[in-house]
Image: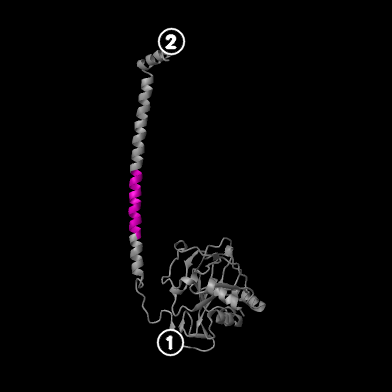
């Protein structure tokens, strides 16, 4: 159970790490079942129930991993952080970085990509050691206080006041709880490794939304809604989502302006190069003129006369 101070810290930071939350027996079972899952993912398409696209794994995982959302310690903390006794499962999904896919993931918040209410909480459960070298998560503390930004895309940190970024090292058995609005991202792994990370998303049982689940799944208490909807059900996406047309136009205008500025800069550079070439030519011509003057009879007579004046003292 969390203390009230830990709950308030989560509300402030949007992230909380609980060490050794899972039992040693669970940790041992997770490590074993991860190897089974890993083999099934490698053999996708060969009569097994798991498949993979980039870092996302689809299908039913081994029971020890698939059913981690039921773990009593996880559920109790989810209830505390959501401040809700009645909670449901929104989704579980496995995210992997390894030799087959090791790309960076841009800074983002999860909420705009999903549906239902914003009262959602992710529990990130590493199935192998998770740290900066394995391309671990970076979390922007306090970013959830900006609310739902409304667009699923790259969040540019330089556009906001400076915030603390943490990049924790997690062992199997540790769990990192993250508000669904909190920004996070990751870099490429810098050493050969696997980075399987299970994301469990909880929500209030007042919310009947669910994602990639066979059916609505109650975790604790009782349902407080009669309205259930699977992500995308009954909706045809527009070619450009509402609210995105303006963004596309703004980006198009910015691109046109950058292209115009670049053309102007290239023209200015070309003109400057021409001026430099002209000045160099004039300088060369002046140097040649001076050299010609120094080799002329007049210049030599002038030099002799100057020397004579100095000898006779006429220059004083």
Residue 312 is marked as: 2
Residue 266 on the magenta span? yes
Residue 227 is marked as: 1
Q: Main secondary structure of the magenta part?
A: helix
Q: Is residue 33 left or right of residue 305?
A: right
The magenta segment is: 254-270
Residue 61 is marked as: none
* Residue that appears at 37% across and 14% down: 301
Q: Considering only vertical position in the picture, is 162 above or below 269?
A: below
The tag earlier along the polypeptide, 2 or 1, is: 1
What separation in Å lies between label 2 and label 1 (alpha carbons)? 117 Å
**Can residue 204 be seen by looking at this rendering?**
yes
Extreme top residue here?
312
Q: In front: 25, or 158?
A: 158
Q: Secondary structure at mark 1?
A: loop
* Quarter where residue 126 is shown: bottom right
* Residue 155 x, y percent position in the rendering: 45, 66
Q: How is the image coloured?
A: one colour
Quadrant location of the N terminus? Answer: bottom right
* Residue 136 x, y percent position in the rendering: 56, 66
* Quarter where residue 315 is shown: top left
Query: So how many labels did they put on this image?
Result: 2
């Amino acid at each position: 159970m969390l203390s009230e101070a830990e709950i308030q810290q989560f509300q402030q930071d949007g992230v909380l790490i609980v060490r050794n939350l899972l039992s040693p027996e669970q940790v041992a079972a997770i490590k074993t079942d991860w190897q089974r899952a890993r083999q099934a993912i490698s053999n996708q398409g060969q009569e097994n129930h798991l498949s993979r696209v980039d870092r996302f794994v689809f299908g039913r995982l081994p029971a020890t991993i698939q059913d981690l959302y039921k773990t009593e310690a996880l559920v109790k903390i989810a209830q505390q952080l959501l401040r809700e006794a009645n909670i449901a499962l929104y989704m579980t999904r496995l995210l992997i970085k390894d030799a087959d896919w090791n790309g960076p993931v841009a800074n983002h918040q999860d909420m705009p990509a999903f549906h239902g209410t914003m009262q959602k909480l992710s529990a990130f459960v590493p199935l192998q050691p998770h740290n900066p070298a394995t391309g671990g998560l970076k979390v922007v503390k306090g970013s959830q206080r900006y609310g739902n930004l409304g667009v699923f895309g790259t969040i540019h940190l330089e556009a906001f006041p400076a915030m603390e970024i943490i990049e924790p090292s997690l062992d199997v058995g540790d769990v990192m709880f993250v508000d669904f609005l909190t920004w996070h991202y990751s870099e490429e792994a810098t050493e050969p490794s696997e980075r399987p990370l299970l994301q469990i998303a909880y929500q209030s049982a007042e919310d009947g939304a669910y994602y990639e689940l066979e059916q609505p799944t109650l975790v604790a208490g009782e349902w407080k809604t009669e309205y259930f909807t699977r992500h995308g059900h009954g909706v045809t996406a527009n070619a450009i989502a509402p609210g995105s047309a303006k963004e596309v136009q703004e980006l198009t205008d910015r691109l046109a302006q950058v292209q115009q500025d670049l053309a102007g800069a290239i023209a200015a550079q070309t003109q400057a190069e021409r001026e430099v070439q002209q000045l160099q030519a004039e300088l060369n011509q002046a140097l040649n003129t001076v050299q010609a003057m120094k080799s002329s009879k007049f210049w030599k007579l002038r030099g002799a006369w100057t020397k004579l004046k100095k000898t006779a003292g006429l220059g004083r």
